[in-house]
Image (cartoon, rainbow, N blue to C red):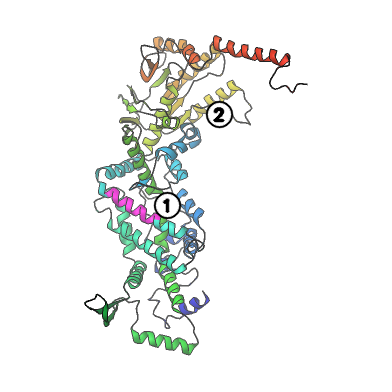
Amino acid sequence: MRVADEIMSDKNSLSLSRGVPARASGGRGELWEECPSDDPFRGSNLAVPDILHEKTQAWTDLASVAGLVRFAFEGGECTEIFDELVRATPLSPSNWHAETFAGHLFLDDLIRTCFPLEIDGIPHRIHEAFLVRALSHPPSNPADTRVRQEVFSELLEQPVIRSDLERVYRAVARLRSHLDSTLQEEPEPIARKLEILRAVQACVEALAEGFGQATSLLSRLREAGQRMRGSQGYERLRQLLDLEGNLATVDVRLRLGADGHVRELALRSVKENEQNPLLPSVWQRVWQRLMAVVRGHRYGQREIVVSLFHEVFSSLVDTVVVCLALVGPMQFYLAGLGFRDRSTRRGFSVCLPEIVDAACPSENRVIERVLEGVFNPLLELQGVEPRPVDVRLGCDDALVLLTGPNSGGKTRLLQAVGLVQCLGQGGVFVPASRARLIRAPTLFVSLVDEVDVAQTEGRLGTELVRIRRLFEELQPASMALIDELCSGTNPTEGEEIARVVISLLPRLRPQVFISTHYLGMAQQLERERPVRGLAFLEVELDGDNQPTYRFVPGVAKTSLAHLLAERLGVTREALERIVAEKIGGWDAWAGGSWSGKDGE
């Protein structure tokens, strides 16, 4: 690039710089020079359009990303850095703590398997880490949830807007692909840089021409695209690509003989693209060449082209960063639509839930929480067909006790309720045909017994730690989902601790679902109703005492443990057979005929 530096240092020698100073290494275009701050995006007119929040969230350290974009344009490896850019997409504040629920809801598995991103049947890679972070940190501001639902509704109701979003995503993905390609993969740098510039143009045009009918946050994409298209840097790009595709028009006359052979080929005229300001006149080019010879400059067409490409791209670096920064938010909506499409193909209905605030203690009003057709999409990971169920609760702060046989669906229902709350407050479709949710300031889920190698407490101690953390995390109107409360000790002491928990929870007026096998305690609570808001659901059984995986009001009479034991082969007869086989094998070994004996 030494020769290119010499060429670009003297604007009089070549008509390459039209009022836009640039350097062959690290040069900034006109949009950058308008920004005197260290971070050019803080003062730039091309801020990243926020399509996830009502009020735009600020990005940090985009200046360093801009430097990496220049490095990638020159053929450097920046794949991991661009992935970090997606993961760093800013989100509005959230009161939820992912460590209290995300692992128990298996959000990473849910995103990987149930949120596909496909455009015209072609799958695209999703950034699981960003989507998990976005869904595990639902916005505290209800307006952000509302505007996300408005975007999803608009994408469903107006297919043309969905097509516009998919077009932008494809263009940005193509730009990212070309930037990711290194000189080892694409050894011809001029062709590679030309494809990058074409991809930038495709991104800007897709943004500027799309979303004409959008009234949601997606209208911000069109506004950003039109600002990009109106910049001097983009005009230079348009001129460059126009010159590359239309340098000159040549008219020829072709005369054929009766035998079909060419008898004459005459050049009629050659008309250069004189309207393009990047193409100097013939006399200007002769004069520039002459002056270069006089000054001792030696250069070829390749150096000129590379320098021109670099100058044009330098003025568009901010545009490229903005486009790359949109990947995460666009994936949020396209993957959310993928979840809906996938569920619909499998015969399940999803919806955008109604979300209301909990009633204040001083208010004399009752809010009914509704879950119709709720299903657990994680069951498909085990090859199990989910069965939609209905859950209707008459008050917003109900404390629900779930009872029923083992493997009857209690844990899966708790998981489904947690997913509905998590996805709903995140502004995404929920696995239910209809839902009215109570906004929860926090979510606490404890469904899976996780064994830690550094764990110092026994099973009871671990359970008590879980209970303490439950009360530390809960706030008024919070949601808590607890599987098999106090099951780690003897029934008498376990019931006593469970009664204490159940008596104290209603004071915070949370939304609580607890599964338990303490049927005697549950039946007594159903009769006495010692605290307000108690509700009871039991697993529905068919005529053969087999669970239907649906729930009805009431308390189960038995856990049907003997049926589960029979199904898993843990009956007295089955175990006696195993013992007899072991004894017979020992006798055979003692007699010297054991198959593993070496005949010693």
Please state the horizontal and vertical placement of residue 172, each as a whole percent of the image: 38, 55
Write down the region rendered in magenta: 161-173
Please state the horizontal and vertical placement of residue 405, each as a whole percent of the image: 44, 16
Please state the horizontal and vertical placement of residue 529, each as a whole percent of the image: 40, 13
Quadrant for the C terminus, please: top right
Q: What crowding class fits label 2: few (fewer than 14 Cα within 10 Å), some (14-19), or many (20 or more)?
A: few
CA gap, disc 2 and disc 1: 37 Å
Image-quadrant location for residue 278:
bottom left
**Prevailing secondary structure of the magenta residues:** helix
Foreground pick, 64 / 174? 174
Residue at image point 44% right, 62% down? 40
The residue positioned farthest toward the right in the image shown: 600
Is residue 155 one of those drawn in magenta? Answer: no
Residue type beneath disc 2:
Glu
Please state the horizontal and vertical placement of residue 255, each as a whole percent of the image: 23, 79
The residue that disc 1 covers is: 58
Q: What crowding class fits label 1: few (fewer than 14 Cα within 10 Å), some (14-19), or many (20 or more)?
A: some
